[in-house]
Image (cartoon, grey):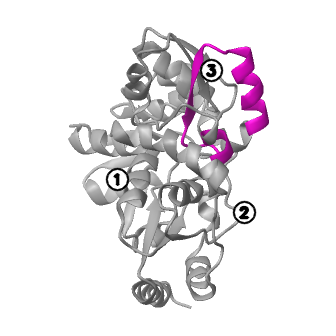
């Protein structure tokens, strides 16, 4: 079936279901093209909480759909692919966090949104890569902060606060395995290009960057920068949006391995079938949803 035909069918089904299609920047280009809301984790969390739609179809990964279900308990949340998970979110369990809280009883727990609902439920507040520094500095009553699950993000944000940051040893494989050698190679091939990196990258990569920020931040940087070439140190799906914003500029992935495979699992056919068959509904038990929502609400109040 032709892409345009599928896109039109999905938009028709969305209208019939009073549904909103929320799409992350790392998704396939043909899915980004028909999004009601296209954004990074922070923007999508905010829009999921605001929407009046009766149904949310989330083209993203499991923790994102869970977050939508947490903040919008009266809505039906569909995740078109149940196997669209997040390796970073899987690097900490609620049981492991419970043990860590005992080990660091005086520390606040900040959970990156790339975490399960059960982990959010045991956290004091959530953060995204966009607002992590603001979240840390809002915790005025704490001197120590345990940041889970992304250790690279924790180490990066530690440079912007006087608090003692305790990083969990998790990481996003897409960002973590980007090496300084990869970046040096890209810079050698494009000597006039600036390098923009996501804070999920390792410290030695971030030290080579002209800009460090979230996916939305990287898009804004590219639009404002006078540079005609930008080396992009995050999942290459974001380049679709960057090209639309700045068609006169050239965007170069920092390596050939910056592709979030689980984000790319979802297809137009999956979204159509999810709307046709009302699958797969993401639900969070109330005993988890309520404390998890408290942590998300604290974050959203800062945004």
Seen from the viewer's position, the closer of residues 220 and 63 is 63
- Using residue 47 as the reference point, say whether residue 233 is left or right of it: right
* Chain part drawn in magenta: 94-120
Q: Residues within 10 Å of mark 3 (few under 14, many from 20)?
A: some
- Residue 217 is situated, as x and y percent measured from the top left of the image, at 35, 40
Question: Which image quarter: residue 144?
Answer: top right
Q: Which numbered tag is attached to residue 167?
A: 3
- Residue 158 is situated, as x and y percent measured from the top left of the image, at 49, 16
The correct choice, above or below, for 79 with respect to 10 in the image is above
Seen from the viewer's position, the closer of residues 227 and 201 is 201
Helix, strand or loop at disc 3? strand
Q: CA distance from mark 2 to mark 1?
A: 28 Å
- Residue 155 is situated, as x and y percent measured from the top left of the image, at 55, 19
Q: CA distance from mark 3 to mark 2?
A: 28 Å
Eye-nearest disc, 3 or 1: 3
Eye-nearest disc, 2 or 1: 2
């Amino acid at each position: 079936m032709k892409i345009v035909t599928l896109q039109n069918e999905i938009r028709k089904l969305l209208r019939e279901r009073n549904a909103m299609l929320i799409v992350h920047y790392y998704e396939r280009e043909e899915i980004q093209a028909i999004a009601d809301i296209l954004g990074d984790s922070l923007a999508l969390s905010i829009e999921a909480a605001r929407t009046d739609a009766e149904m949310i179809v989330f083209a993203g990964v499991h923790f994102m759909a869970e977050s939508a279900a947490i903040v919008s308990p009266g809505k039906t949340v569909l995740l078109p692919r149940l196997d669209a998970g997040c390796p970073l979110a899987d690097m900490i369990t609620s049981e492991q966090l419970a043990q860590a809280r005992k080990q660091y009883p005086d520390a606040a727990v900040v959970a990156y949104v790339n975490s399960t609902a059960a982990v959010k439920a045991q956290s004091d507040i959530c953060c995204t890569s966009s607002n992590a520094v603001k979240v840390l500095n809002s915790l005025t009553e704490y001197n120590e902060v345990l940041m889970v699950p992304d250790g690279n993000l924790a180490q990066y944000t530690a440079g912007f606060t006087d608090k003692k940051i305790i990083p969990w040893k998790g990481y996003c494989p897409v960002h973590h395995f980007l090496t300084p050698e990869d970046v040096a190679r890209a810079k050698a091939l494009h000597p006039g290009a600036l390098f923009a990196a996501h804070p999920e990258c390792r410290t030695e990569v971030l030290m080579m960057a002209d800009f460090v920020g979230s996916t939305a931040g990287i898009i804004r940087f590219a639009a404002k920068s006078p540079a005609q070439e930008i080396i992009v140190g995050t999942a290459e799906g974001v380049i679709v949006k960057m090209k639309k914003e700045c068609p006169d500029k050239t965007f170069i992935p920092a390596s050939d391995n910056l592709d979030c495979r689980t984000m790319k699992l979802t297809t137009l056919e999956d979204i159509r079938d999810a709307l046709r068959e009302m699958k797969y509904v993401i639900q969070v038990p109330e005993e988890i949803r309520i404390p998890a929502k408290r942590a998300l609400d604290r974050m959203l109040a800062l945004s």
